[in-house]
Structure formats: C-alpha cells, structure tokens
Amino acid sequence: MKIHFFTLTILIVLFSSCSVKDAEEIKYNYITIYSDSKTDNDSLIFRKFEKEEKIKVRFRYIPSDSILYTIKTEKFNSEADLILLSNYNLLKKASRKKLFLPIKSTVLEKNIDPIYHSTQNHWFGLSKTPLVVICHKNVLSKDRIKNYHELIKPEWKNKISLQEKNNQTMKYFENNIRFLLKIKADTFLTKLEKQSFLPRSGDDFKQIERVKNGETIFSIVKLSSLAESHFKYDTTNEKNTQKVQAIFPNQRKKGCFMAISGGGVHRYARNPQNAQKMLEFLSSNRAQYKYAEKRYEFPISKDVNPCFELEKFKKFRGRLYKY
C-alpha cells in the first residue's frame, strides 16, 4: 500500500511539473538571437517586444571575429533564430555562406529602403553611420578635404594614420574603394598607406586619440565611433575629444560611404516566424530610435530622428555601396 502511495505521489509531481512547463510554453513562444554587439538599450527593446508579442527573447553575444564561424559550425544544431550583425562586411559574408533564410515581408519592405537590404531579402539594415575623415579643429579647416581621394595628395605625406588591416572599418573602406576603382584600387591603397609615418594599429578610437593628441592630422573612422568618444566619457575627456571634427567626403557627388548594421533570419531557425516578427519590430518607428541610440548610429527609418548626439551631423549625403 505504501509502495502504491509513493508511486502515485511521484506521478502527481511529474505531471504537475510538466503542466507548469507546458503552461510556460503556452504563455511564451521563444526566439534566440545571436549578435556580435550588445548595448544597454537592447534589453529594453527586447522586453518591449516580449510584452507586445508574448514571445520570450533569449540573447547570445558572440564576438565579431568568431560569430559567423560559430553559426556555420553549429549548422542545423544551432539555436539561433535571428542573427544581428554590426556591419555590412559580416552581413555580406553571412549571405555568401548561406546562413540566412530569404523572407517575404510587406512590413520590412515598407519600413526599409531597398538600398538597405539585400536584393534576395536575406538581410535587412537596421541602423547606419557614415565613414568620415577626422582632423583636429585647431590644426586644419574641414573645408580642405572634399573627398577620400584627396588624402593621397603629396601635401598630406606623413600626416595620415590608419587602423590595422583586420579592423572592420578599414576592411569596409578598402572594399568600397576596390568596388569603385576596380583595377586602380590597389594603386590608391598603396599610396594611402605610404602617406602614414605611424605604424598601422588599433581601431577607430585609437585613431581619434592620435588626432586629438596631435600625433597625426587625418584618419578615417565611423561617425558612430566619433560620436561615442564625444559623449561616452567624463567631462575632461569630452572636452578633449570635441577638438576632433568630422569631414564628410564626396558631398558634391553620391555622398560618403555608408556603413550599416542589420540582421536576418537564420537558415536553420527553429522559430523563423518569430525571428521575422522581431525584424519587423526592430524596423518599426517605436523601436528604431532606441535601437540606434546606444550604437550612436542613425535610424534606418527616415521618419525617426537621430539621437541628441547626432543631431548636428544629420545634414549630409551618404550611400551604401553593395560591393
């Protein structure tokens, strides 16, 4: 009798736990996001999405240099439903590696200009920032440089600093140059490298530091990095970094190079419908401001104003080249 009572008790506990779990599944659907960037606003946006759609968000951060390898290696065993990437280089590589599932969405096509998503709808841009030339306000007038090509003029010999070759900003710049100049690109890039007397090192913030300290006159960085350096540090550093100004090249023609961040639905997504809903949500006006704000980037939507830090920069011409 005691044995039967014990068995019955165990069964009741098991069924109760299953019922609780099933209730959890019914209450929330799930989506797992893989991303190579994370900001304070991400959790706020995800919570808003969870509240509106009743879809639970799971987030996994993976650094830029390993995220595509991780997803490719995991294949259909991956838990990723949505892949969010911080730059066009990664979006392009992910598309070539066939990591994205093409999707049809009237919402995304309405919210995002065709120039900012792939022609096969594999990925969609969510925020954008231009590649600018930076210089010290007290050393040079920003009117002296009209386009990127003027940087190889003899007068700027030993006055330019460049990032290390594996840096994403430099890769993006070089890919754009190769796309536009074709066979002349290598000649241009070789001349540009000879313009620098400093060894190539660091990222955007290293170049901003070099310009601020007077070690060099010019460098090429993303505007988002300059905006972040202006406003993310304490008052003393802010005053120093405000001495570095942005020059927007190619304004008489098609505009400066535009970098973007964005995402797509994973090819082996377990919840592709939920991933599409998240993309649509992130492209909406109610999410665009917050998504772009902590990245110090411009919203992809024309109907959404940029954050305070970028207000003074919003009048420029830029173009995304799909090389």
Image: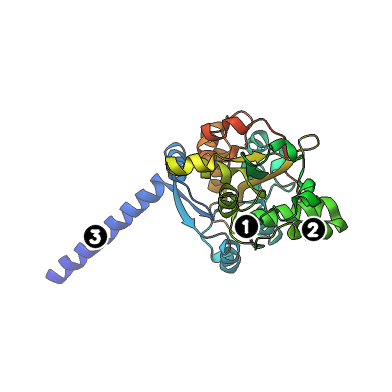
Q: Amino acid at mark 2?
A: Lys
Q: Which residue is mark 3?
A: 13
Q: Amino acid at mark 3?
A: Val
Q: Is residue 126 visible?
A: no
User: Which tag, 1 or 3, sits closer to the chain's start?
Assistant: 3
- For this orientation, the residue located farthest to the left is 2
Q: Nearer the viewer, mark 1 or mark 3?
A: 1
Q: CA distance from mark 1 to mark 3?
A: 39 Å
- For this orientation, the residue located farthest to the bottom is 3
- What percent of the width, then of the height, locates residue 143? 73, 35
Q: Quadrant of residue 171?
A: bottom right
Q: CA distance from mark 2 to mark 1?
A: 42 Å
Mark 3, Cα crowd under 10 Å, few <14 / some 14-19 / many 20+, is: few
Q: Could you tell me which secondary element the residue under label 2 belongs to?
A: helix
Foreground residue, 269 or 311?
311
- What percent of the width, then of the height, locates residue 193? 74, 59
User: Which tag, 2 or 1, sits closer to the chain's start?
Assistant: 2
Mark 2, Cα crowd under 10 Å, few <14 / some 14-19 / many 20+, is: some
Q: Nearer the viewer, mark 2 or mark 3?
A: 2
Q: Which residue is mark 1?
A: 267
For residue 50, the mark is: none
Do tag 1 and tag 3 residues touch (Cβ < 8 Å)? Answer: no
Foreground residue, 243 or 7?
243
Q: Is residue 111 visible?
A: yes
Residue drawn at x 40%, y 47% is: 26
- What percent of the width, then of the height, locates residue 112? 66, 37
Q: CA distance from mark 2 to mark 3?
A: 74 Å
Foreground residue, 104 or 304?
304
Q: Amino acid at mark 1?
A: Arg
Residue drawn at x 32%, y 53% is: 19
Q: Which residue is mark 2?
A: 191
Residue drawn at x 79%, y 61% is: 190
